[in-house]
């Protein structure tokens, strides 16, 4: 096993499960430890399966929560998921899916989900994209637009209370450059728990996941940096010239459990107000 610690970034460089003392390595939080799952081989399915077990069974799907045990997953493949996906689509309480996750970014919360038939692995942005990207669960992929950085906030599914989770994992497609893709975890006080670089696997899949064994799930927010170039620009993937387009497939996380920290509620309310205003502005200008 090889473990790198560079600029407070932790990287598992081989296919393996590592048990780490996050507090001793980073001095960023009081959380005692983490179990990290990292895989960038030809077949990542065994590592993903192990991570699912670590998060907990069953997959709670669109069931209202919180539920004491289990996990949630998003694979983007349901026919109701639109190409121009609202950031709160997966926390919709009117109809399923209700999976307790809201996405935001600094470009008016713009996200795209490749839709088979009208968009094959984002070929509507660049015709060469399907040659670069692959899927874990076919056929759809996910990406922020106008930026490469986005946040995931957690809520009780169908209940809309702020929530935390015991672990989070993501599958990335076509990471070409080391350190172009990051996963940053934040706690209820919006303090950085830890920061991780995801292993590269050109034209292949990379998986990164982490779980915590704390009694109270610590992850309140996840910030993801997917590559270094916005897919919405229509540029071709060109790592030799420093252009790394990265998109995502499945997201997996523990069952969101409600929290009632006043500071978190204020932070959350401000974020949701921005999300509402941006969506209202976008609707008024279409």
Image (cartoon, grey):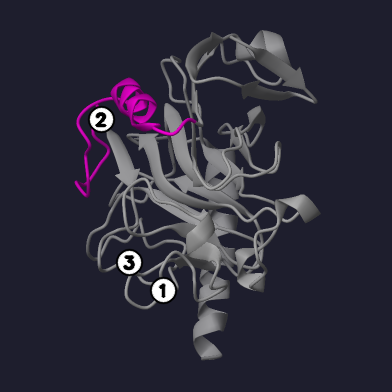
The crowd level at tag 2 (other Cα within 10 Å; few <14, some 14-19, many 20+) is many
The span shown in magenta is 41-69
Mark 3 vs mark 2: give the one in front: 3
At x 54%, y 40%, the residue is: 221
In this view, the residue in front, 89 or 239, is 239
Does residue 27 show up?
Answer: no
Mark 1 vs mark 3: give the one in front: 1
In this view, the residue in front, 16 or 76, is 16
Q: Are marks 2 and 1 in contact (CB under 8 Å)?
A: no
The crowd level at tag 3 (other Cα within 10 Å; few <14, some 14-19, many 20+) is some
Mark 2 vs mark 1: give the one in front: 1
x, y percentage for residue 114? 42, 66
x, y percentage for residue 225? 64, 47
Picture quadrant where residue 73 is located: top left
Q: Residue 70, labelled with which disc? A: 2
Picture quadrant where residue 110 is located: bottom right
Label 1, on which residue?
119
Q: What is the CA distance from the residue labelled 1 to the residue labelled 3?
A: 13 Å
Answer above or below: position of 13 versus 81: above
Looking at the rendered structure, the secondary structure element under dot 3 is loop
At x 43%, y 14%, the residue is: 213
Looking at the rendered structure, the secondary structure element under dot 2 is loop
Looking at the rendered structure, the secondary structure element under dot 1 is loop
Answer above or below: position of 37 versus 174: above
Label 3, on which residue?
81
Answer above or below: position of 258 versus 138: above
Q: What is the CA distance from the residue labelled 2 to the residue labelled 1?
A: 33 Å
Q: Is residue 83 magenta?
A: no
């Amino acid at each position: 096993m090889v473990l790198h610690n560079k600029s407070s970034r932790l990287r598992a460089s081989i296919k393996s499960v590592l048990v780490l003392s996050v507090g001793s390595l980073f001095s960023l939080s009081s959380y005692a430890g983490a179990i990290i799952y990292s895989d960038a081989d030809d077949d990542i399915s065994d590592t993903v399966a192990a991570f699912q077990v670590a998060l907990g069974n069953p997959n709670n799907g669109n069931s209202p929560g919180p539920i004491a045990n289990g996990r949630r997953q998003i694979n983007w493949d349901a026919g109701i998921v639109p190409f121009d996906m609202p950031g709160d689509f997966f926390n919709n309480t009117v109809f399923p899916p209700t999976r307790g996750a809201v996405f935001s970014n600094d470009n008016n919360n713009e996200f795209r989900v490749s839709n088979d038939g009208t968009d094959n692995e984002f070929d509507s942005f660049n015709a060469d994209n399907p040659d670069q990207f692959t899927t874990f669960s076919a056929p759809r992929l996910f990406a922020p637009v106008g930026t490469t950085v986005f946040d995931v906030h957690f809520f009780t599914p169908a209940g809309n209370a702020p929530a935390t989770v015991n672990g989070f994992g993501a599958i990335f497609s076509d990471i070409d450059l080391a350190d172009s893709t990051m996963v940053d975890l934040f706690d209820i006080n919006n303090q950085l728990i830890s920061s991780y670089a995801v292993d590269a696997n050109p034209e292949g899949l990379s998986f990164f996941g982490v779980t915590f064994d704390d009694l109270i799930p610590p992850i309140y927010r996840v910030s993801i940096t997917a590559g270094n170039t916005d897919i919405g620009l229509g540029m071709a993937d060109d790592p030799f010239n420093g252009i790394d387009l990265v998109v995502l497939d499945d997201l997996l996380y523990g069952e969101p459990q409600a929290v009632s920290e006043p500071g978190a509620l204020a932070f959350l309310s401000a974020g949701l107000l921005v999300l509402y205003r941006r969506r209202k502005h976008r609707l008024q200008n279409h």
